[in-house]
Amino acid sequence: MGDEVLANLMQQSQVFPPDEAFAAQANATADLYAEAEADREAFWEKQAERLHWETRWEQVLDWSNAPFAKWFVGGRLNVAYNCVDRHVADGHGDQVAIHWVGEPGDTRDITYAQLKDEVCKAANALSSLGLRAGDRVAIQLPMIPEAIVSMLACARLGLVHSVVFGGFSPAALRSRVEDADAKVVITADGQYRRGKAIPMKANVDEGLKGIDTVRNVIVVRRTGIDAPWTEGRDLWWHDLVDSQSTEHTPEAFDSEHPLFVLYTSGTTGKPKGILHTSGGYLTQAAYTHHVVFDHKPGKDVYWCTADIGWVTGHSYIVYGPLANRATQVVYEGTPNTPHEGRHWEIVQQYKVTIYYTAPTLIRTFMKWGEQIPAGYDLSSLRLLGSVGEPINPEAWLWYRKHIGNGSLPIVDTWWQTETGAIMICPLPGASALKPGSALRPLPGISAKVVNEKGEEVPHGSGGYLVLDQPWPSMLRGIWGDEERYRDTYWARFADLGFYFAGDGAKYDDDGDIWLLGRVDDVMNVSGHRISTTEVESALVSHPTVAEAAVVGASDPTTGQAIVAFVIPRGGVAQDEASGEEAIKALRDHVAKEIGPIAKPRQIMVVPELPKTRSGKIMRRLLRDVAENREIGDVTTLADSSVMDLIAKGLKSGS
Ligand code: WT7
């Protein structure tokens, strides 16, 4: 959003006070802010009491070794026990935990008692392979129950899972398996995508070529398509897991025992393994799921449409909801398979009450047309959520009108892989909502908008978003790279001890926060973080490309879209390089190197790239080209004629 556009929006913005009936039954009232403010540590201590601890902590927070936090020091718990067994022990074994819906139409309803059996069997299976607490397990699976069972089985044994999104390439899997030194990989024969079974195990094999530290690959049979097989290493899930005992005694682990690593794009080509631990992470995942989604166990039917390959799936499909004894829908497929009403059909059938999705999907629904949701009974819904990027007010208003009966609260939730759980967001029973604003830090959380010097900016102004107090679900580091952790998040405001989120933000006149998007070289495409450098590296690894520069250009559906500028290698003619086939080959190459989500929307073949005298590519100017704008200030260019060359080259090329 441009600054001017935003200023206008902030001014004319409508305000929707909380609905009285909703407020009267809400899990959280405005008092919670004051309570947390009065004593932050006492507040978090109370939230930690939502969980079952084998041993209680001695200290709430140890920040003496900042920026490495320890929460609930000395406490011991088992995360899987908290998400599954204790609900069965409390007499809720027959409650459905997961209404699973497969893309081809097959379904499974799994109760908490059944989930407990499945998790215990999988834990026994993983133990039988010799895995011990602290070992890493990579998981690349479609959205099937075994994905959740695998994560919980790891948590139960103190194994550190590293989930790799099912759409990621063999190369992306490989770098993650290598970086975390995973001993076991769990995958499937194939996955369904838009009605077709496509291979998964074959990709995993390609990714694992030459890696000899992976002892076993466990394969779930999902589609029945052929899977290549390595005798002695590969094991079918059904052969290994089905015959195991459903008895397994969970061991309690230290509150700071690593729970998972999840890789996310940074400003350099190499993804960062974000490390999360147990007690603090689960506390904040459960607390936020309770207050932000107003979740009532045994009554609500909750649905988060994310994939477990992203942090949203970790915190708001697996850990938060299950810790809170949710009944939830898990859907395997794409939203338009076999038709564009698939989500609304599922909402109608399972009487979903809470629906949490991403702005990019809301804008897609807008494109498909309001007549589609209008054809279904959505009256069960009582709360809507949004995550992944700033939600534009048009999309917010459409969501409220056409999905939310014109009346439901919408919680716009700002957070990151690094924060582990929701940080800035309305309380649905207490906040006056403003379309496009995430409003305020949740009770217990502190965030500020500051200038270059770290001084808080006045209301009505913008700057950088920082988190100025530690929080329980904060990342504990980058796997294997302490220095990069300090540099990336803590160096910018080192004297002040602020965590720098990488986002720009503004206060409006009421002091409410409006997120403005990334201020670094990270793009946000359909709510997914992709680094410009990573796509550039993929492009230059193609034999016809000499140099590449990538920018995120605004896109009506995906928020940002990837636009690449490439200089062909000597010997490759400009015409040949800009031909349809050559461009397609490049786009496919990026998909193969990183994954289809990183495919550039557009590739422009140019003779030169705009650079400063120190050789830095001026992405700002390329963004002007990509967004069809008048070219901005070119005075810092080493060679100011470059932009003319680019413009001319593009005209002749098209
Ligand atoms: C980045 C984090 C959090 C789970 C999904 C993405 C952007 C996320 C919002 C929001 C404005 C948002 C930020 C952030 N972002 N939610 N509600 N409003 N921006 O997790 O891949 O770690 O990306 O997504 O730019 O830094 P992620």
Image: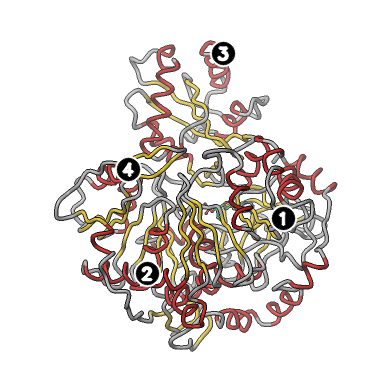
Look at label 4 and name its amino acid.
Ala
Look at label 3 and name its amino acid.
Lys
What is the x, y in percent for residue 628? 64, 25
Give the mark, 1 or 4, whose residue is nearer the N terminus: 4
Gap between marks 3 and 4 measured at Cα: 35 Å
Residue marked by disc 1: 379
Q: Quadrant of residue 299?
A: bottom right
Q: Is mark 4 within 8 Å of ligand 1?
A: no
Residue marked by disc 3: 651
Residue marked by disc 4: 171
Give the mark, 2 or 1, whose residue is nearer the N terminus: 2
Pointer 2: residues within 10 angstroms few (<14), some, or many (20+)? many
Q: State yes or no: discs 1 and 3 in contact (Cβ < 8 Å).
A: no
Q: Answer left or right for 14 relative to 80.
A: right
Give the mark, 3 or 2, whose residue is nearer the N terminus: 2
Element under disc 3: helix
Of circles 3 and 4, the one toward us is: 4
Q: Nearer the viewer, residue 372 or 324?
A: 372
Gap between marks 2 and 4 measured at Cα: 30 Å
Quadrant where the image shows the N terminus: top right
Pointer 3: residues within 10 angstroms few (<14), some, or many (20+)? few
Gap between marks 3 and 2 measured at Cα: 59 Å
Q: State yes or no: discs 2 and 4 in contact (Cβ < 8 Å).
A: no
275 shown above or below 133: above
Of circles 1 and 3, the one toward us is: 1
Q: Answer left or right for 640 relative to 201.
A: right
What is the x, y in percent for residue 647? 57, 17
Q: Is mark 1 within 8 Å of ligand 1?
A: no
Residue marked by disc 2: 119
Of circles 1 and 4, the one toward us is: 1
